[in-house]
Image: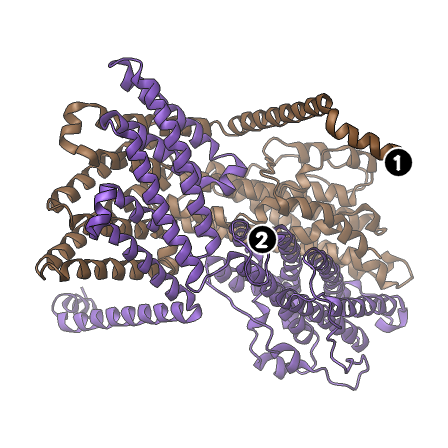
Chain colours: A purple, B brown
Amino acid sequence: MNLEQGKQQQGRFDGGPSRIEAFRKNVNAGVLKFVRNVRKLGRDDPRRVVHSLKVGLALTLVSLLQYCQPLYDSFGVSAMWAVITVVLVFEFSVGATLGKGVMRGLATLLAAALAVGAHHVANQSGRIAEPILLGFFVFLQAVVFTFARFYPTIKARYDYGSVIFILTFSFVSVSGYREDEIVKLAYQRLSTILIGGSACIIISILVSPVWAGEELHNLIASNIDKLAGFLQGFGHVYFEIDEDLVSNRNKSFLHGYKTVLNSKNSEDSLANFAGWEPGHGRFLFRHPWEQYLKIGARTRRCAYRIESLNCHLNPHAKPEIPSKIRETCTEMSLECGRALKELALSIRSMVKPLAAYVHIEKSKSAAENLNSLLQSSGLWGDNTDLLQFVPLATVVSLLIDVVNCTEEIAESVYELASMVNFEAVEPTVSPEKPETGQSKPLKSSDDVNSPSVIIVIDEPSLENGTSSATTTDSCSKTSN
Amino acid sequence: MNLEQGKQQQGRFDGGPSRIEAFRKNVNAGVLKFVRNVRKLGRDDPRRVVHSLKVGLALTLVSLLQYCQPLYDSFGVSAMWAVITVVLVFEFSVGATLGKGVMRGLATLLAAALAVGAHHVANQSGRIAEPILLGFFVFLQAVVFTFARFYPTIKARYDYGSVIFILTFSFVSVSGYREDEIVKLAYQRLSTILIGGSACIIISILVSPVWAGEELHNLIASNIDKLAGFLQGFGHVYFEIDEDLVSNRNKSFLHGYKTVLNSKNSEDSLANFAGWEPGHGRFLFRHPWEQYLKIGARTRRCAYRIESLNCHLNPHAKPEIPSKIRETCTEMSLECGRALKELALSIRSMVKPLAAYVHIEKSKSAAENLNSLLQSSGLWGDNTDLLQFVPLATVVSLLIDVVNCTEEIAESVYELASMVNFEAVEPTVSPEKPETGQSKPLKSSDDVNSPSVIIVIDEPSLENGTSSATTTDSCSKTSN
């Protein structure tokens, strides 16, 4: 054992105070970080705090059933079910709360009725057969409804209802074997569930409601906005002459689109909840929420192209590009971004997306321009080293794909606009048209930092972490 | 009113029988379709039927608590909680059941202890203050724990625990106000929950268990397999000379990868459940499930590239390609597919992915070959119409991206292999190397229809529906 090792081991035993100090510091830092996270959680979306208060309020209100003697006398121990209902039914959005509340009510009603029937049948069959028959009924309904939960439609919409059905049927039919007042029990349970459910629904609608439909509406618009942010930035970063400007700027807009890639599940569940909601604000009952899913799917497809495009953002892989091609590509990307931004705006403000078509036409004519530029053989010089041309061709081709995707998104937004009669407002295209001439500097900072680009990268999961860490890696290899 | 209209209206009133007939036919067809779907559901995964039977068994077993007089005497009405626990805790996989069961137990224990404490404090504060104080406690814990459910870590892992905490605390502290035997109540509830939870866990482990870890393991392998299936098919379909062969063949392998795009959520939840599971079969406790998520993320990134590649599959957009380039590209795609298939196999059978590297090296050398082919100017003829070259360049570039992604996947699989000491087995490369010569036909049918390619397109959702319908559309525009 040499001197160093000896010192280390000594430290392990009698270096106590300093290690306790370090531990205390660690704990302090952890607590501080936790507090900061919690505060951020509330500040990012204050509706979370409001929701928590709403749940507390509902729970305290239904507890009154237990505290007030006259109410307690009429409901008895069943009053507990109101508490359970509130805890299990109260969700963040009105749609989810309504859906769960209604399902809970209906499933309980149906299951209780069937259980009373089952109890009646079992009752007539003699003392010995009764528990066997009841057990068989419980077994049968559990098997049938558990299997039903695998059926796609039921799984997507009525999963909670199935669980409640199994629960209530087992509960009522089994406890019915003991208590002879089974009908009274079922009635009490139903009425307390009704009270709990109504408390949830009323509070969730009256106290600063969170509508799933509006959430979906905004999510779709902000997803389109994220793609717009990328495309408006991409043109500059990839084709920009002024490297310093590019490297200094905040590049978060180039990663905003990543959350779009995995947004399918949240869109699906929001659309599901939105179907339960009554008309509210600008949305009537039976608003075409399915159409939002269609727009969402097309937006996601566009995001996949952008993910491939993003791989070619590595500055080292940048080929030397003739300036005319560079400008046309930049215009294509910018116009596409503007079109998407107009589409997002059109969804948000519910006006017809007329301006978007202007930008799409511009990006398409830029694409045609590009085609003729590529056809004119003189541009690329005399050497026909096609290898040099591959990265540029890829970017061009992916950009053209993106233009097509944008057109598809525009089509589906237009379908939505005609379904729900969006207002027709004159196109809001900015008066000064960006020229394709060489001399005019592109209004880079305006486009990238314009206020309507909202870039939120929420919950940086492993997915995002690894992808941002390794994308550069994979891209640098591409340049070889 | 003309004659036709009159006839129609008449039909509406007295044409009853034929319409009833039509209605009956419709209903019959609907029922038949439903039955067929249900049968398919069970046949696709017989474990679903077994799971339903397991739930029925568990529920019937805990009902015994209620039927048997001696058991009923010791638990009373609390026996109901065993039934509720089984319904809410029993999940498809062992991990999910264990996680929910343990969380339910711990959260109930903690909440009950705190509620008893709260009840004690309230009890000491006088008759009037008691309900107010209890109401305040209920409100406070509901607010705190509802807000906690928004915290990402808690939301991902302890959401159910939080709900149960709120439920139990409210339940015990509120009912404690009435019943003086609050400690007995808490004890009874805990023991019946323990009985219900144990029944779930024991049955779920002993009767043909479904391990979430194994599911994750297989999902990751089959996702990689799907990409392999696409790449092995892509080479043939895009570069194939024999068009008839291509158009006649079942092209489902070209869509299998689409389910990979949206697999993040299922992977995340499976990994979460797997963390709860004890060692089983080939998986020890604390198997590195996180590493599977890393492999999954990289697989998904490869799938995004493939999605872009798939857009260029339209036969009308196919450019005329010099045969040498065509062969090299086909080889690149095939070797990449073989590498991925080896990786999937290596995960499935838990042996080191040595053979995969051979194929990756081959695909990389094919890429280098391609580079030098593109550099030799004579190949493309004398016309330097770059526009014609764009589609090919894109496919080449995306294929190179795919090769890089494959290498990344291989790296992470290798990391996994060294983490859990996969067996080292000699590479299982097929003895006859596919030649790059022109004369030898590529073994197309072998590659595409080989038994280890499993292509399952489950639940064709709106997403898949719209994408497959419109991809061709978007691609045909690209060719202009």
Q: Identify residue type, mark 1.
A: Asn
> In the rendering, at what x and y percent does residue A245 appear?
62, 83
The answer to which quarter of the image holds residue B464 is top right
Give me the residue at 27% from left, 51% from top: B165
Give me the residue at 63% from left, 26% from top: B27
| Image position of B95 (left or right of B197) | right
Mark 2 highlights which residue? A285
> In the rendering, at what x and y percent does residue A142 appear?
39, 29
Mark 1 residue element: loop
| Image position of A374 (left or right of A59) | right
Q: Identify residue type, mark 2.
A: Phe
Answer above or below: position of B194 versus B290.
above
The residue lying toward the viewer, choosing from A445 and A248, is A445
Mark 1 highlights which residue? B2
> In the rendering, at what x and y percent does residue B254 appear?
68, 42
Q: How far apart are marks 1 and 2 (CA)?
A: 38 Å
Chain where mark 1 sits:
B
Q: Which residue lies furthest to the front in this view?
A: B1
Badges 1 and 2, same chain: no
Mark 2 residue element: loop
Give me the residue at 42% from left, 33% from top: A110
Q: Residues within 10 Å of mark 1 (few under 14, many from 20)?
A: few
